Amino acid sequence: MMRKAFVGFGMALALAALTGCGLVSSTNRSVFFVFDVSGTYVKAVPDAAKLANITIADMQPGDWVGASQISACSFSEKEIILQRQLPTTPSLAATAKRELFDDFNTYAGQVKSAKYTDIRGALAQAAFELKQRPEASRYIVLFSDMIDDYGKSCDTSNIKLDLRDIHVVAANVIKTNPGDPEKYFDVLRKWEAQVVAAGGTWSLVSSPDQLPKLVNGV
Amino acid sequence: MEQSLDQAAGFPPSVADSGSFFGVPWWLALLGLILLMWMAREPLRRVVWQVFFITGRVFGRWGLWLSEHGRNARASCNEKIASHRADELQDRMLVLENRMGKRAEKLAKETGPVIARLDKSTHQLSTAASDLTDINLEDAAERAFRAALPSMESGRGLNKLEKNIAQSTARAMNDRLVPVRPALSTIKTEAPRLREVAEKLTKTEQEFNQSVDEVNKTFQEFEMIMRSDDRTKIAARASIVIPWLIAVIITAIALSGVFLNFFLIERPMSEIVGEGARIAGVGLPTFAAIIVIFLEFVAGVVLMDAAGFTRLIPAFHAMSDGARRTMFFVAFGFLSLFSILEMTLSIVREQIIEQQQETRDLANRALIAPSLTPAPEPAAPETATAEPEAAAPEENRGLQLSTIAQLILAGIIPWLLAAAALPLETIVRSSVFMLSIVGSFLMLALAFICKTLSVGFKNVGLFALSVYDAIIFAPLWIERRVKGAVRNRGGGGDASSGDVDDPMVLDRRSPTPPPTEPRRNREKSREPELQKA
C-alpha cells in the first residue's frame, strides 16, 4: 500500500512537471445519452438502456457519462437523469460501470411517457452540459424516433444550436410507420442537416455492436 | 517540299539558299561569331579557368584533407583497438595469475598428503624389497635336503625317502616364505596406490603446464601488441564484429523478454497510476511500465557491475571492495523488490481482466435477455445452471494455472533483464570501434569522390578550352603567323617566348623540364601555402 502511495505520488509529481511542459494530454471522452420518452418511443427505452449499458461497458476509466430524457420541455436540468465520471483505476471503474447499469435499468423500469417531444431542446441541454466538460472527445447519443413535437408553452424549434466539437450519434431509431420508408429517411436527412449546420458531426447506428465501436473506438 | 523538310527537321537553310540571320547572310554571321569568339578568347578562357579549375582544385584539396583525416582516424582507431586488446590481455593475465596463485596456495595442501603417502609407500616397498632380497631359496633347499639325509639312512624304501625330502623341503620353504608374505601383500597394496598418486601428480603438472602455456601465450600476444609497429595488423587480429554480433543477438533475445514483460505489467500499471492521460502521445500506464522496465535494467546493470562481471560504470572501479559489496546487495535488493512487484502486478492483471470481462458479460447478457427484469423460470434454470457449475472448477483450475505461470514469468524476467547487461558491455565497447572504423572508411570514400570530381572538373575545363580553340582555329593561326613575322623582323629572341607567358596555352612543355621533386615533398611544400591561404 505504501509502495503504491509512493509510486502514485512520484507519478503525480512527474505528471505535474510534464503538464507544465505541455506534453501531457487526455484521452478521456464524455458521452451524453439522451432517451426519448415520448409516446411513440417510450416502449423502446428499455432496449435503448441496454444499448447504453453495452456502450458504458467498453468505456475507459476516467471517462464521463451523462444522461437525460426528451420530454415536453427538454432544455432543463430537471430532465437530467445522471452525471458521473468513471474512476481512473480499472477496478473502481468496473464497479462504477455496474452501478451505472443498475441506474439505467431502474430508470428504464419506471420511465413515464411525455406528451411532447422536444428533441432540439434536449440536444441544446446535452451540448450545454458537454461544453462544460474538459474532455476533448464529446458524444451525444440520441435514442429516439427523431420525430419532434413541440408544445405551445415550450417551442424550441427555432433556437440556435451550437454543436461544435460534438459528435451526435442517433441510435435505435425506430420506424414509426413501416409503410412509409421515405418519410423515415427524410427525417434522418433533416436531422443530419441540422446537426451539421450547428457545427457538429452526425452518425446513424443501426446495429447494437456499432455503438460501442463508434463511441469508444474499441 | 525539300526546304520545308529541312525546316521541319530544324536544319538551318544553307548559304546557297541565301538564308539570313536578322537580315545578315548566314556565312557572314558565322564569320562574325568566330571573330567575336577570337576577340573574347582571353576573358572567356579566364572564366572557364575560374569555373572548372578552381572548383577542381577545391575538390582536390577537400579530397586531400579527407584522405589525410580518414587515414589518421583509421590509425587512431587501430591504436584504440590494439590498446583495448592489450587491456583485455592484461586483465586476462591478471585473472590467470590470480588463479595460479590460488592454485599454488592449494597445491601445498593437496601435495602434502600425497607426498607423505608416497614416502610411506616407498619406505614400505623398500622394506619389502630388502626382505625379499634376504631370502636364499637355494640355501633353504640345501638345508632341507641335508636335514632329510639322517632319515634316509634309517629309511626302508625309496618312496618314503622321496616323501621325506619333499616334506622337509616344503617345510623349509614355508618357514622361509612366512616373513616374506606381508612384504608381498604390501607390494600388492601399495603398487596401485603409487600409480594413483603418480597420476594425480601428472594431472597437477599438466594443469600447471596448461596455465603456464596460457600465461605465456597471453604474454607473448601482449608483448607483440606493445612492441609491434604494424597497428593495422594488430587491430585486424582483434575480432570486433563477431563478439558484437553475438552480443547483439543476445540483446535482441533479451529485448523480446522486455516486450513480454511490458505486456505483463502495462495493464495492471493503470491500477497504480490511473488511465486517461497521455505523455508525449504515450498512455500513462504504458509510460509507467516502460519506466519500471528501465529501472529494472539499471538495477541489473548495477548488480552486474558490482559483482565484477561488467565494467560499464566507471565509478565502480574506484570503489573499495566493501562499498562494491554494499552496492551489490542494494542492487540485489532492488531487483528482488521489482520481482515481487511484477508478481503482484501479474495477479492484479488477472483480476482486472476478470472484472472487465464480467462487466461486459453483464451488459451483453442484458442485451440478449428478453426484458430488463426477466421473470425466474421454474424448471429450465436448474439444468442450465448445473452445467456452468460443473464447468466452473475446470475453468478455475485453468485460471489458477495461468496465474501461476504468469507469476513465475514475472518473477524471472527482472533477473533475465539483469543478465542482458553482460552483452551490453560488448555492444557499447565494440560499437565505438565500429563507428570509428565506418567513419574513417566514409572519409576515405568521400576523399576518393572529391579527388575524382577534381580530376573530372579539370579535364572538362581542358576539353571546353580545346573545343573553343578548335572553333576559332583560323583566326588563331593567322594571329600566330603575324606575331611570328613581327618577331622575325625585330630580329629577336625565342619564337616561343611570346607564348610562354600566355596563360591560354595549356599543354606546352618546355624542352628541358625542371627537375621534379618527389611527390611527398611536393605535398609537404604545398602545406605552408595552404596555411597561409
Image (spheres, coloured by chain):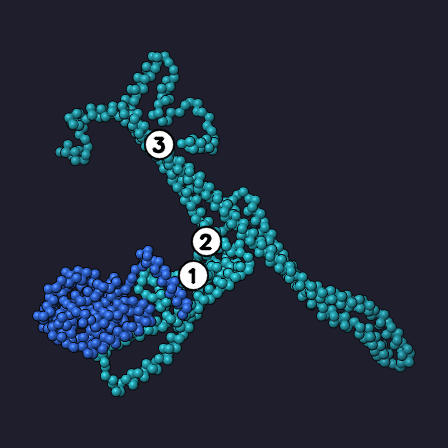
Graded by Cα atoms within 10 Å as few (under 14), some (14 to 19) or many (20 or more), the crowding at tag 2 reads few
The color chain B is rendered in: cyan
Q: Extreme bottom residue here? A: B379
Q: CA distance from mark 1 to mark 2?
A: 19 Å
Left/right of residue B44 with respect to residue B406 in the rendered view: left
**On residue B32, which mark appears?**
none
Contact (Cβ within 8 Å) of mark 1 with mark 2: no
Camera-near label (1 vs 2) is 1
Q: Earlier in the sequence, mark 2 or mark 3?
A: 3
Q: Which amino acid does the dot numbered 1 rest on?
A: Leu
Q: Residue at x 35, y 32 (%)?
A: B54
Local secondary structure at mark 3: helix
Q: Is residue A151 visible?
A: yes
Q: Residue at x 25, y 24 (%)?
A: B36
Chain blue in the figure, letter: A
Q: CA distance from mark 3 to mark 1?
A: 60 Å
Q: Which amino acid does the dot numbered 3 rest on?
A: Phe
Toward the viewer: B348 or B460?
B348
Q: Earlier in the sequence, mark 3 or mark 1?
A: 3
Q: Pointer 1: what residue?
A: B295
> Residue B86: where, in percent of width, then height?
54, 49
Q: Residue at x 88, y 76 (%)?
A: B147
Q: Pointer 3: what residue?
A: B53
**On residue B428, which mark appears?**
2
